[in-house]
């Protein structure tokens, strides 16, 4: 039982040899997540941008947006200020119509700050012909090949149980779409969203094929209405099957947001997948600290990494309605996914490539990112919503070879344990702090897990 004070366990971002089928997830959950595709196709920018003018938009009132700021721990979320979230919420707060597939370790779907924004499969709700609840009748009511997949699917256990035995998936889900304005805990970047939970890795179930689970998760998202996929994992092993699945997502108009990885390396020369597959619907995200410096653990690359976002000591949701801090490109990826929800809900006609274009072109230029990302920009939510077309064209794809050597890597599955996986995919959350409830509790800043050197 945790007290009202935050307790932190420092997780030092392990890198170890992966053996066994679970490796895919471990690698694929780089610092809490990375995923992206590579393709040689280049999408032309149909709507160049004007970074100097604001578009005519129907904004929410400042009073309404301020209501969203009453959650007790939102003042601790430095990333909100860094990415200009409050002003962005005056323009868009997202929409429940935008379905985000969170491919991760599962999630606490009953968390006080998540349950209102968990996706509900319309084909598995209501009563069947015999008057039974479709959610629990043991029948594939919607004919999609999955029985009672009410909120998503567990590809580890092949059922609808989405329990998060790690915490990473719940943390990512909260950054993207924790409920706002409910006087509880935190607020997600997109307070209105539908989170489809797809579980591909579980540290308590060794020997599973995490790469296969990832591919199946992507294809589930494609077939069941996702508009955005968040993949906060990855590894150094190239997979044609994974790339093909993300290409299927691209053809279906799905944006794929992936972590650049926590290998402390230049992705231009040392590829990290799926972020480096080079497909036009992929956004590769690295992590920055409050000073806008790329974290020492984060991958970078002027040809491969698209944009930077807050990723150090990020406060978010954890299982059992708890909250805590984690660090890594996984967290930064979730920020960008939340931004994509805001953009795609505000501009309903945008394709995945157009949403990507706006997010990348409207970030804040930073000297510290000149040799670190393709755009030299950090995420700015407000500008992504308000800048209009002009003379700036943003290429939506990177032309990469899509091949690379297979090397071993490892990841964290719990506070201080390691999960092994033969498929070379890794997750790692550097720090975690826990508490029963943030309401009325003071967060001890001195306990925050620091980024390892």
Image (tube, rainbow, N blue to C red):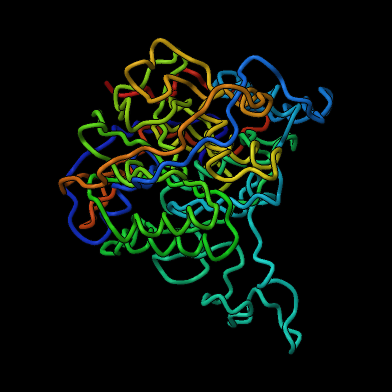
Identify the residue at image location x=20%, y=32%.
Answer: 269
State the image coordinates of residue 400 (x, y, percent, origin top left): 29, 40
Q: Write down the quadrant of residue 391 in the picture.
A: top right
Q: Nearer the viewer, residue 132 or 230?
A: 230
Identify the residue at image location x=37%, y=62%.
Answer: 213
Q: Which of 11 and 356 is in front in this view?
A: 356
Q: Write down the quadrant of residue 91 in the picture.
A: top right
Q: Is residue 91 visible?
A: yes
State the image coordinates of residue 1 (x, y, percent, origin top left): 50, 44
Identify the residue at image location x=74%, y=89%.
Answer: 130
Query: Does residue 331 lie above or below 209 as drawn?
Result: above
The residue furthest bottom is 130
Q: How many labels does the image show?
A: 0
State the image coordinates of residue 329 (x, y, percent, origin top left): 39, 33
State the image coordinates of residue 5 (x, y, percent, origin top left): 54, 29
Q: Nearer the viewer, residue 43 or 199?
A: 43
Q: Nearer the viewer, residue 216 or 398?
A: 398
Query: Does residue 176 lie above or below 392 as drawn?
Result: below
Q: Is residue 413 visible?
A: no
Q: In this view, does 349 lie to the left or right of 22?
A: right
Identify the residue at image location x=29%, y=63%.
Answer: 209
Q: Write down the quadrant of residue 263 in the picture.
A: top left
Q: In this view, does 304 lie to the left or right of 225?
A: left
Query: Does residue 151 lie above or below 98 as drawn?
Result: below
Query: Does residue 325 lie above or below 242 as drawn?
Result: above
In the rendered image, the quadrant that contains the C terminus is top left
């Amino acid at each position: 039982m945790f007290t009202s004070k935050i307790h932190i366990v420092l997780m030092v971002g392990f890198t170890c040899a992966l053996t066994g089928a679970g490796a895919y997830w471990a690698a694929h959950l780089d610092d809490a997540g990375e995923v992206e595709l590579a393709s040689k196709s280049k999408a032309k920018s149909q709507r160049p941008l004007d970074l100097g003018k604001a578009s005519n938009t129907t904004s929410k009132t400042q009073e309404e947006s301020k209501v969203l700021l009453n959650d007790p721990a939102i003042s601790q979320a430095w990333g909100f200020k860094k990415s200009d979230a409050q002003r962005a919420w005056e323009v868009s707060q997202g929409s429940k119509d935008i379905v985000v597939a969170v491919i991760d370790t599962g999630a606490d779907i009953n968390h006080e700050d998540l349950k209102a924004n968990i996706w509900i499969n319309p084909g598995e709700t209501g009563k069947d012909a015999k008057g039974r609840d479709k959610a629990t009748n043991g029948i594939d009511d919607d004919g999609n090949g999955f029985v009672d997949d009410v909120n998503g699917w567990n590809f580890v256990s092949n059922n609808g149980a989405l329990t998060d035995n790690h915490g990473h998936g719940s943390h990512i889900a909260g950054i993207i779409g924790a409920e706002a304005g409910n006087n509880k805990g935190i607020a997600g970047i997109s307070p209105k969203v539908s989170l489809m939970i797809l579980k591909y890795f579980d540290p308590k179930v060794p020997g599973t094929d995490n790469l296969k689970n990832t591919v199946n998760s992507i294809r589930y998202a494609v077939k069941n209405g996702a508009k955005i996929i968040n993949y906060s994992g990855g590894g150094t092993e190239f997979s044609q099957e994974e790339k093909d699945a993300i290409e299927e997502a691209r053809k279906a108009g799905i944006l794929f947001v992936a972590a650049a990885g926590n290998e402390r390396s230049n992705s231009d020369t040392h590829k990290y997948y799926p972020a480096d597959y080079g497909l036009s619907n992929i956004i590769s995200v690295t992590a920055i600290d409050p000073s806008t410096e790329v974290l020492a653990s984060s991958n970078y690359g002027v040809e491969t990494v698209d944009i930077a976002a807050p990723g150090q000591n990020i406060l978010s949701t954890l299982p059992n309605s708890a909250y805590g801090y984690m660090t890594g490109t996984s967290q930064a990826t979730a920020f960008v996914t939340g931004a994509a929800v805001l953009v795609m809900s505000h501009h309903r006609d945008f394709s995945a490539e157009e949403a990507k274009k706006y997010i990348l072109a409207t970030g804040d230029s930073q000297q510290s990112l000149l040799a670190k990302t393709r755009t030299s920009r950090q995420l700015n939510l407000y500008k992504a919503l308000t800048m209009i077309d002009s003379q700036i064209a943003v290429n939506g794809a990177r032309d990469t070879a899509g091949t690379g050597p297979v090397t071993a890597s490892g990841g964290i599955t719990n506070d201080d344990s390691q999960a092994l996986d033969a498929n070379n995919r890794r997750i790692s959350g550097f720090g975690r702090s826990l508490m029963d409830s943030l309401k009325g509790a003071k967060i001890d800043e001195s306990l925050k897990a620091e980024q390892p050197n």
